[in-house]
Image (cartoon, grey):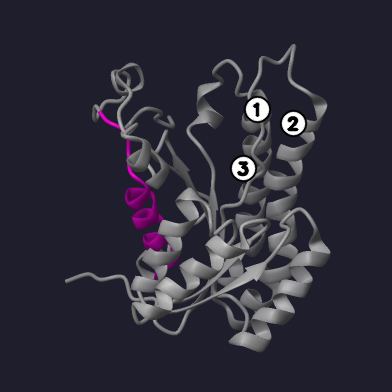
Amino acid sequence: MLSIDLSGRLALVTGGSGELGRVMARTLAGCGARVAVTYLKNHDKAARLAAEICQSGGSAHAFYADVTDKGSLLTLRGELQAWCGDPDIVVNNAVVQYAWKPVLEQEASAYESQFRSCVMHAVNVAQVFVPAMIARRHGRIIAINTECAMQNAPTQSAYTAGKRGMDGVLRVLAREIGIHQVTVNQVAPGWTVSERDRLAGSEHNEAYERGVPLGRRGTDQEIAHVVAFLASDLASFITGAYVPVCGGNVMPAI
């Protein structure tokens, strides 16, 4: 029987206190990984999540990190090394939130925020954490992209631009470091049901679900399952992939 065993691995989840990040962190911990949960503003949420994981028998700790600032990630690297070493798995999940508007109305600051939190996030993580992965000839970079990158729908321009730019960086990175047995992949969720939806009773949206071949929205746990798979040795020969987890709402073509 196949199983996902991440015992002995350290996983870093940026934006780990967020809606999807929390479930990814719990799932990776459930597979045996030690988990570093980063936060920018939500220290209390991150600390509660780390405590929850530890109370469940796992190992986790909350760390501050600004993914748009390489210096902040260098500080984080030192803190991780003091805690338990260099990360084997990095999940690029954090992104700046902003109000979506049509191109003709969208502020320049929105495009700049997406460039910093998508493109430079990927660059900073690579420059800070990949060298140690290369040295031990093992590592997993997993970035959270989006179905929006293929949809080109109205009001999505800044988000789409940031995620498409990130995609370009990561595909090049996959080619550059693959020889060192370090993989680089992307998970692209659709409009995902998270804890916020469950609390608000907003899990369903008929207009959206009509366009999804599987007829429903995906869940945060379904996203986390794919992240855990890509983090594991089961995915050792997969790199450079963009994996939609959206029920077929977008389908990359050959």
Q: Which residues are magenta?
A: 216-232
Which residue shows up at 67% across the image and 33% down it? 98
Q: What number is the disc on residue 99? A: 1
Q: Earlier in the sequence, mark 3 or mark 2?
A: 2
Dot in front, 3 or 1 = 1
Dot in front, 2 or 1 = 1
| Residue 61 spot, x, y in % from top left | 55, 76
Considering only vertical position in the picture, is 11 above or below 185? below
Q: Quadrant of residue 152?
A: top right
Residue 150 within the segment the image draws in magenta:
no
Q: Is residue 103 left or right of residue 89?
A: right
Circle 2 residue: 110
Q: Earlier in the sequence, mark 3 or mark 1?
A: 1
Q: Amino acid at mark 3?
A: Asp
| Residue 23 spot, x, y in % from top left | 41, 57
Q: Secondary structure at mark 3?
A: helix
- How crowded pointer 3 is (Cα within 10 Å; few <14, some 14-19, many 20+) is rated as many
Dot in front, 3 or 2 = 2
Which residue shows up at 39% across the image and 30% down it? 251
| Residue 167 spot, x, y in % from top left | 61, 42
Q: Amino acid at mark 2?
A: Ala
Q: Quadrant of residue 27?
A: bottom left
Quarter in which the N terminus is drawn: bottom left
Tags 3 and 1 touching, CB below 8 Å: no
